Image: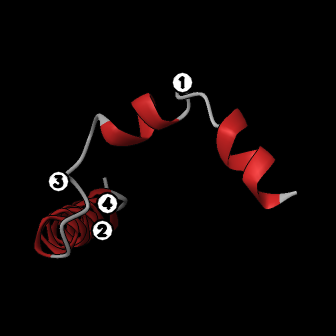
Amino acid sequence: MEIIYLLVPLSLIFLVVGIWVFFWAVKHKQFDDMEGPAHRILMDDREERRKLK
């Protein structure tokens, strides 16, 4: 039963940190372009590699 006195405040601290990290990510625009990286990996970049040679 005494472990509850440790686990409840600890879980509240984790909750506050998780909410803070979420709002930090939104503020720093981490969720603006969710599809760009997925499409970028499929794009053919052979022409760009040829230009570099």
Please tell me which of labels 2 and 1 falls first in the chain: 2
Quadrant housing residue 47? top right
Tell me the crowding category of disc 3: few under 14, some 14 to 19, or many 20 or more residues within 10 angstroms, Cα based.
Answer: few
Do the residues under discs 2 and 3 have CB atoms within 8 angstroms?
no
Query: Camera-side residue: 7 or 53?
Result: 53
User: SS class of the residue under badge 2?
Assistant: helix
**Left or right of residue 51: residue 9:** left
The amino acid on which the numbered mark 2 sits, given as a three-letter code, is Leu
Do the residues under discs 4 and 1 have CB atoms within 8 angstroms?
no
Q: Which residue is mark 3?
A: 32
Q: CA distance from mark 2 to mark 1?
A: 43 Å
Do the residues under discs 4 and 2 have CB atoms within 8 angstroms?
yes
Please tell me which of labels 4 and 1 falls first in the chain: 4
Numbered disc in front, either 2 or 1: 1
Q: Residue at x 28, y 65 (%)?
A: 14
Q: Is residue 35 above or below residue 12?
A: above
Q: Which residue is mark 2?
A: 10
Query: Camera-side residue: 36 or 26?
Result: 36
Q: Residue at x 33, y 68 (%)?
A: 6
Q: Position of residue 17 (x, y in %)?
A: 24, 72
**Mark sitting on residue 42:** 1
